[in-house]
Amino acid sequence: MADVQFHQSQTGKKFYEQDVPRIVKALERIADALEGTNKLEEKRFKQEIINEHNRAKKDKETIMKAIREKYGDVFFEKFIEKTSNTDGKWV
């Protein structure tokens, strides 16, 4: 009996002609699903960052208004000088 290579056997032919293409298609479906999930998560993450930024901005405005109302304009201007960096941003 001659030695038959795997790719020449019935099992080998089935593996390469049927099983491998099915495995490739399954991997492609998995990759597509992961890509879709990643895009959705990225979109959610970006929206969370935007929401957090908006909340922080609103909180800052609320704090500034409360300081001005409680302590007056003169104190408020001094407060801004002390709590702002050189480009005018609030520290």
Image: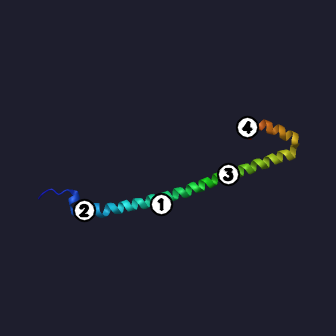
Q: Which residue is mark 4?
A: 87
With 45 as the anchor, is 5 left or right in this view? left
With 72 as the anchor, is 25 left or right in this view? left
> Residue 29 location in percent, x, y?
43, 61
Q: Which residue is mark 2?
A: 13
Query: Helix, strand or loop at disc 2?
Result: helix
Q: Quadrant of residue 31?
A: bottom left
Q: Mark 4 or mark 1, which has the lower sequence index?
A: 1
Amino acid bearing label 4 = Asp
Amino acid bearing label 3 = Glu
Marker disc for residue 33: 1
> Residue 28 location in percent, x, y?
41, 59
Q: Mark 2 or mark 3, which has the lower sequence index?
A: 2
Image: 85 above or below 38 = above
Marker disc for residue 52: 3
Mark 4 or 2, closer to the camera: 4
